[in-house]
Amino acid sequence: MTLSNPIDRRTFMAATVTAVASTAVHASKESRSMIPVIDTHQHLWDIKKFKLPWLPADGVLARSYSINDYKMHTAGLGIANTVYMEVDVDPAQQLEEAEFVNALCSDAMSGMKGAVVSGRPASGDFGSYVEKIVKFPGVRGVRQVLHVPSTPSGFCLSDDFVRGIRLLGTKNLSYDLCVKHSELGNIAVLLDACPDTQFVLDHCGNPDLKETDHSSWMRGLEAVAKRKNVVCKVSGFLASAPGRGKWTMEQITPIINHTLDTFGPNRVMFAGDWPVVLLAASYAEWLTAVRQVVSTRPETDQRKLFHDNAVSHYRLKL
């Protein structure tokens, strides 16, 4: 990551030193003064237990990531609790994944308070699958990653998909949206078609940091935000950078601010997207960057972003 503005560079480096390089005692004092963070997008996977067809053969993601790894990467950063986010396991293992994370949600030592699990809303057996997962107290919602090349444009508006999403609303389960920003117009139509289902838009709607013109993303985000049955996560888009550290505060600040201003303080949530975030930055760098961007906003709005909105929108019992 590079910072071209000298003032920004000094501010960012000072904050990073505070968050990352302090001693354990100092980190503990800092975490007490921080707004406690609920990370609403925590990935975990065990490649000996689950098949992840999308996982690359090498690189930073080509290994298992456990709850202990997460705690090590986030130590001293003020993370209070987490919400698990599905990892696109082989569809045959979806129920097994749900059982695995539900057990973690029942373990007070894990810090996990809820889970969004894998699902295929358009599948013929989705109804029976939902009847099984709704019995797990830790499950709060479902997600199917839709930004993969194999998903055609407009798939989210197919009759079978819409039917599955409406079913979630009847079961008080939310649906997380992970889509290309070019699909945001279709997502707005989906939200209108499923008014009784609560949605969560992941990763600010996935603007691409390799692009310089974000006007299409901005219009799409604004269209989605006009619908009241959706909230948005400030997360994830950092992974679209061309490589580790190849992003700037000047790039991400307008994206974060536009997301916050478009959705308003009551409909945004912070998320770490760990370990996918490691493609572009450490967890500390991402969290510190977001804290810097929002530092001039009212403390009540910051608390909603980092903590309170997660409790209400994912219905967490702390």
Image (spheres, rainbow, N blue to C red):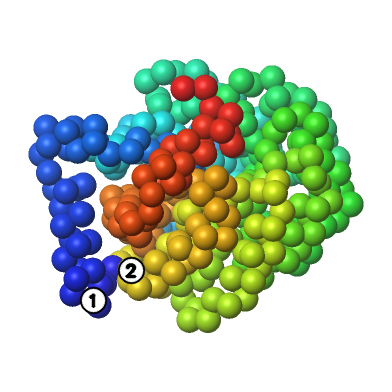
Q: Are marks 2 and 1 in contact (CB under 8 Å)?
A: yes
Q: Quadrant of the N terminus?
A: bottom left
* Type of amino acid under label 1: Asn
Residue at mark 2 to residue at mark 1: CA–CA distance: 9 Å
Q: Residue at x 85, y 56 (%)?
A: 158
Horizontally, is 187 left or right of 259 in the view? right
Horizontally, is 275 left or right of 292 in the view? right
- Closest to the observer, 225 or 18: 225
Asked if residue 140 shows in the view, the reply is yes
- Closest to the observer, 236 or 145: 236
Report which quarter residue 250 is drawn in.
bottom left
Mark 1: few/some/many CA within 10 Å (<14, 14-19, 20+)? few
Q: Residue at x 52, y 32 (%)?
A: 311
Report which quarter residue 149 is drawn in.
bottom right
Residue furthest bottom in the image = 213
* Type of amino acid under label 2: Met
Residue furthest right in the image = 159
Measured as percent of width and height from the top left, residue 198 is found at 70, 41
Q: Earlier in the sequence, mark 2 or mark 1?
A: 1
Mark 2: few/some/many CA within 10 Å (<14, 14-19, 20+)? some
The residue under label 1 is 5
Measured as percent of width and height from the top left, residue 112 is found at 45, 28
Measured as percent of width and height from the top left, residue 220 is found at 66, 68
Q: Tell me the element at label 2.
A: helix
Q: Looking at the image, how many numbered discs can be counted on the residues?
A: 2
- Closest to the observer, 79 or 150: 79
Q: Is residue 255 above or below residue 56?
A: below
Q: Residue at x 76, y 29 (%)?
A: 171
- Closest to the observer, 180 or 249: 249
Horizontally, is 167 left or right of 17 in the view? right
The residue under label 2 is 249
Horizontally, is 295 left or right of 81 in the view? left
